[in-house]
Amino acid sequence: MKKMITISILVLMTIAVSFCGESQKDTTEDTSAAPADPGKAVYDQFCLSCHGITGEGDGPAGKALQPKPRNFKTEPFKFGDSLEAVMATVSNGSPKAPTMAAFKNMLPPESIKAVAEYVRKLAGKQ
């Protein structure tokens, strides 16, 4: 139980840190460039710290988690790899892996869909 609380606090701290960094974003971006992938932007903010830059489960926060974050490139998706299945996992989290938080109350549906598409792209599913 103590370990579960510690893990939960670590996940929440990671999310909080990502929110803090958002307020310091450079507002002088070149608007003539092609728009960035919205799924990558959501991934970078909410998923990268655990799943890593390339989705290999090697993010800095993920190293302290048990079970370890999924490696999207080599491990099968626990609940399926269709767009709908990945969206459901992002929305609802994983009941058997409490380190995978539910994001349905933090992200709008369009962001959940965008990040699910990006995760599938990292896994080579698109």
Image: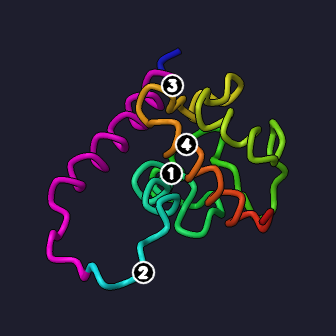
C-alpha distance separating marks 2 and 1: 23 Å
Which is more N-terminal, label 3 or label 2? 3
Residue designated by label 1? 47
Looking at the image, which residue is at 51% across and 25% down? 3
Left or right, residue 16 beside residue 12 = left
As shown in the figure, which amino acid type bears the numbered disc 4?
Ile
As shown in the figure, which amino acid type bears the numbered disc 1?
Cys
Q: Nearer the viewer, mark 1 or mark 4?
A: 4
Q: Nearer the viewer, mark 3 or mark 4?
A: 4
Looking at the image, which residue is at 78% across and 66% down? 126
Bounds of the magenta segment: 3-30
Q: Nearer the viewer, mark 2 or mark 1?
A: 2
Residue designated by label 4? 112
C-alpha distance separating marks 2 and 3: 44 Å
Q: Estimate the x, y position of residue 125 in percent, counting from the top left.
A: 80, 62
Residue designated by label 2? 34
Which is more N-terminal, label 3 or label 1? 3
The answer to whether the residues at label 1 and label 4 have Cβ atoms under 8 Å apart is: no
Residue designated by label 3? 3
Q: Is residue 101 above or below residue 111?
A: above
Element class at badge 3: helix
Which is more N-terminal, label 2 or label 4? 2
Looking at the image, which residue is at 57% across and 55% down? 51
* Residue 23 drawn in magenta: yes
